[in-house]
Image (cartoon, rainbow, N blue to C red):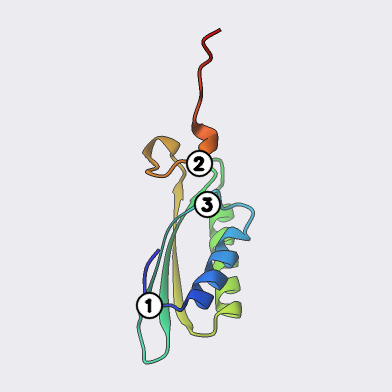
Amino acid sequence: MSGSASKHDLDLIMDAILGCSDVEKLISLKTYPVESDKLLVVIKIALPAEKTVRDVADVIAEIQAQIERTVPTVGAVYVQPDIYRPSLDPEPSTDVFVLKSED
């Protein structure tokens, strides 16, 4: 996660993203100053593969609206949807590890 947003604003942005039940993983989050007091927020999220285009559009709209409501310094939000691929994840969660027993 990188950019020019304050820690407080980043926390609010992350809460808005991760508060959406359809988001499986926040892949990346970047913020950029675009005007004297506004931020551009660029997000890549993983969604379930079975989601329809309409479902994805609804999730994106929900995230954008929540961020714009809670972080007044945000001027624009761009959300790129993706499908979570654990095999490509550089930081997999611990539940993907399998320990084999020697029994």
Q: Secondary structure at mark 2?
A: loop
Q: Secondary structure at mark 3?
A: helix
Q: Distance from label 1 to label 3 (Cα)? A: 31 Å
Q: Residue at x 52, y 41 (%)?
A: 49
**Residue type indicated by callout 1:** Ser
The image quadrant that residue 90 belongs to is top left
Q: Secondary structure at mark 1?
A: loop
Tell us which disc is closer to us: 3 or 2: 2
Foreground pick, 56 / 72? 72
Say whether disc 1 or disc 3 marks the residue closer to the N-terminus.
Answer: 1
Residue at the spot of label 3: 53
Q: Residues within 10 Å of mark 2 (few under 14, many from 20)?
A: few
Count of marks, rendered view: 3
Taking the view exactly as shown, the residue that stands out farthest to the bottom is 36
**Looking at the picture, how far across and down is residue 26, in whole percent?**
48, 55
**Residue type indicated by callout 2:** Ser
Q: Quadrant of the C terminus?
A: top right
**Residue type indicated by callout 3:** Val
Residue at the spot of label 1: 4
Tag 3–tag 2 contact (CB < 8 Å): no
Q: Compared with residue 95, is residue 1 higher up or lower down, i.e. above or below?
A: below
Taking the view exactly as shown, the residue that stands out farthest to the top is 103
Q: Distance from label 3 to label 2 (Cα)? A: 27 Å
Q: Residue at x 36, y 82 (%)?
A: 33
Taking the view exactly as shown, the residue that stands out farthest to the front is 102
Foreground pick, 58 / 27? 27
The image quadrant that residue 36 belongs to is bottom left
**Looking at the picture, how far across and down is residue 35, in whole percent?**
36, 89
Residue at the spot of label 2: 93
Tag 1–tag 3 contact (CB < 8 Å): no
